[in-house]
Amino acid sequence: PITAYLYRDGIADLAVRPYTNDPAAWHDPAVHIATTILQRQQAGYDQDQHCLTLEEWRRHFNSDKDAEHIWQNIESILKTSLQAVTEPLEQTSNAFLKHPEQCFELLAIEIMLDSTLKPWLIECNRSAGLRAEYGGEVKIRLLEDALGLVLARRQELSDCDGMNKKPEPASGHGSFYRLL
């Protein structure tokens, strides 16, 4: 089965202007697209206010309880989404890789919160943007932790080489924690 880890030190991109359903604003990227590359071109953009670490983002809420409830809902969406693509991912890795359990992929997941703080899955990108210009320190730590997780798994599998049972995947590494 697929093993998935969630990185708790991600990045939250905030739109310059509040979301609206007004048809006049449908084509306004400052309202509908929070991607930093597009937002930084908008009047009023401030990288310190609109490109936050998840820790900074959590401070926007009235209580840790609000942030925790939102995070639990996000995790639920992610688990459902990952389970939906498990079979095609397994088929691809089994068809092309000698040791598919050593395969990994970094995904960038985009979630939008509505006015009631309900999370909505917007998209899942297989090629996560890792430009250090935005959230550079977070992305450097993400890569270090991802490689640490992969290398630790490789060592676990090497240590039990020839045994019938593979070791259980780690519960986490660095800022990654096991989601599935």
Image: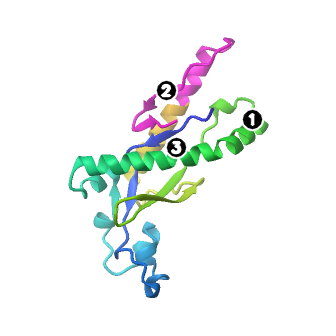
Q: Residue 1 location in percent, x, y?
A: 63, 32
Q: Left or right of 127: which side holds 5? A: left
Q: Residue 47 location in percent, x, y?
A: 33, 67
Q: Left or right of 118: which side holds 163? A: right
User: Residue 94: which numbered mark, if any?
Assistant: 1
Task: Residue lying at the far front in this picture: please name it.
Answer: 116
Q: Left or right of 66: which side holds 172? A: right
Task: Residue lying at the far left in this picture: please name it.
Answer: 62
Secondary structure at badge 1 equals helix
Task: Residue lying at the far right in this picture: please name it.
Answer: 95
Seen from the viewer's position, the closer of residues 150 and 5 is: 5
Q: Is residue 130 visible?
A: no
User: Residue 79: which numbered mark, if any?
Assistant: 3
- Identify the amino acid type marked 3: Lys
* 53 magenta-colored: no
Q: CA distance from mark 3 to mark 2?
A: 17 Å
User: Residue 170: which numbered mark, if any?
Assistant: 2
